[in-house]
Amino acid sequence: MIAGLSNDDWLRQDPPHPGRSIYHGCLEGNGEDYEGMTIGEAAAKLGINRVTLSRVINGRARITTGLALKLEAAGWGAADSWIRRQANYDLAQARKRLNQPPRQPARPDRDWMQS
């Protein structure tokens, strides 16, 4: 965590690339069918190229909607969650490039939600 920022603020400002979660959360032992698999074996199981999966895991490629659906089918989380994490990462990277700090999250109007 960065000094002076809450954990939520830090994650909005500098979230990790979601590909790291594929390795740490899925290949390192949390997925029963994939525990101890190499990247090549996991890629074959997902039906994608090993180089593609390696690039995503190492933060050099994005999680696409197609990959998100394949991860979901493998039991590695919901596709929409993977897409949100990728979007949050992309937004943080764009803000860094523009030197624009993150804004407070929008709060929907409660009256609008009740109508």
Image (tube, rainbow, N blue to C red):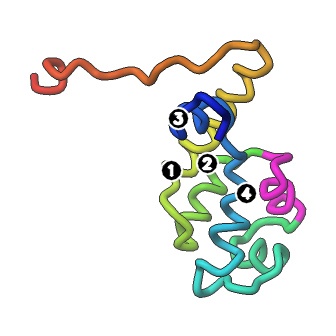
Point out the frontmost of discs 4 and 3.
3
Circle 3 Cα neighbour tier, 10 Å, few/some/many (<14 / 14–19 / ≥20): few
The stretch of residues the image draws in magenta is: 51-61
Counting residues from the N terminus, which is met first, the one under dot 1 or under dot 3? 3
* Dot 3 amino acid type: Ser
Residue at x-position 86% and y-position 55%: 55
Q: Which mark is residue 65?
A: 2
Picture coordinates of residue 31, whole percent (x, y)? 59, 79
Question: Do the residues bearing badges 1 and 2 touch, measured as CB atoms within 8 Å?
Answer: no
Query: For the residues marked 1 and 4, what is the alpha-carbon distance in whole angstroms?
Result: 14 Å
Query: For the residues marked 2 and 4, what is the alpha-carbon distance in whole angstroms?
Result: 17 Å
Q: Secondary structure at mark 1?
A: helix
Counting residues from the N terminus, which is met first, the one under dot 2 or under dot 4? 4
Query: For the residues marked 4 and 3, what is the alpha-carbon distance in whole angstroms?
Result: 22 Å
Query: For the residues marked 1 and 2, what is the alpha-carbon distance in whole angstroms?
Result: 11 Å
* Dot 2 amino acid type: Thr
Query: Residue under circle 3?
Result: 6
Query: Residue under circle 1?
Result: 81
Picture coordinates of residue 102, whole percent (x, y)? 59, 20
Point out the frontmost of discs 2 and 4.
4
Q: Quadrant of the N terminus?
A: top right
* Dot 4 amino acid type: Arg
Q: Which mark is residue 20?
A: 4
Question: Do the residues bearing badges 4 and 3 touch, measured as CB atoms within 8 Å?
Answer: no
